[in-house]
Amino acid sequence: MAGSMRRNQRVLRASLMAASMAAVFGLAGCKTNSAETAWQLIQQQQQDQALARQKEDEAENKRRPKEPEMMLSLISEAQRQDRYFASLAYIDAYQQKFGNDPRVAVLRAEALRQTGQTAMSEQAYRALLSTDQAADGWHGLGLIAGSRGQFDQAADDFARAAKLSPMDARILGDLGYARLRAGDPAGARVPLGQAAELSPDNGKVLANLAVLLLVEGEPVRAQRLMDQARLGDEARGQVLRMASDIRSQRMPAASAMPAATSVSADTNTTRVSSGGGIVMPVMSPLMEGLNNGPIVR
């Protein structure tokens, strides 16, 4: 009996000990699992926060223009305002900060031309001929040739530019004008027509076409075109004079436009008498370009 009780006591103690050990190990396991779960949760939260910040930065970068683009916009705006000296300063700053850029090279060549630095401008335009901006290069060279009165050369340069950029109304308008001044109205008709249809709201393009119509003896159509372009009195006078000069160059000196125009001193107007009796005021030149003709710059 006593032996049996001792055995039972030993079994009970062993059971209690096993239960205690199991409780200890179970508690340790719970602590380990809890720690691992908390660490994983922290890591996940950090990853989510980093991803959210990245998305915010990307959205902000899309909304905010890049600094080079902002400077390019500044240069272009200065040139639109005819502030070419200022644009050269902006271009120097851009190149110092961001290096060479083909887009800036075109703007620099134009600024040099507009500030009277013709030799440097010509060099800058020629440097563009081996780049993707070759059309701008040939166009600029044509403008320089035209400013020297070399209209045959200008027409050739513009034709090269138009071949590379066939839908540029600016280039086509200049090509037509140069051919007009070179004594080739027939060759001017197609590029001027293309320019007018590609850019129907461009007053300078329409003025070029009006010159052609006057040269070809169609003053009524020329008048309508100038009305469409909403040309002012000064611009209309420039168109009239340019057409008169071109027609005079095409005729013998003795019979150059004998009754094409008549000037009335009391009204200060020029009457185009070759068709329709249209009266337009005489004004000083307005449009800038090849030899002060109505040309798209």
Image (tube, helix red, strand yellow):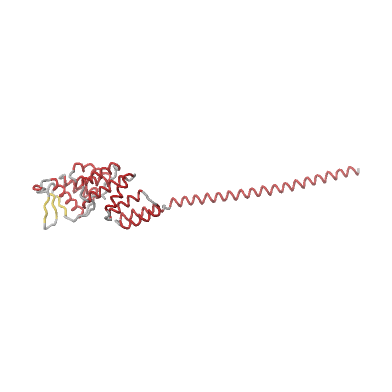
- Does residue 262 appear to the left or right of 199 in the view shown? left
Q: Nearer the viewer, residue 5 or 176?
A: 176
- Residue shown at 21%/51% (left/top)? 291
Q: Quadrant of the N terminus?
A: top right
* Number of disc labels: 0
Q: Residue at x 20, y 42 (%)?
A: 187
Residue 279: % across, % down = 15, 52
- On screen, residue 70 versus residue 247, left or right, reads right
User: Residue 80: where, in percent of width, then height?
Assistant: 31, 54
In percent of the image, x 32 and y 44: which residue is there? 130
Q: Tell me residue 45's x, y (percent).
A: 57, 50
Camera-nearest residue between 248 and 196: 248
Front residue (pair 273, 163): 163
- Residue 154 location in percent, x, y? 23, 46
269 vs 42, nearest the viewer: 42
Q: Residue furthest left?
A: 254
Going by the image, does 3 lie left or right of 126? right
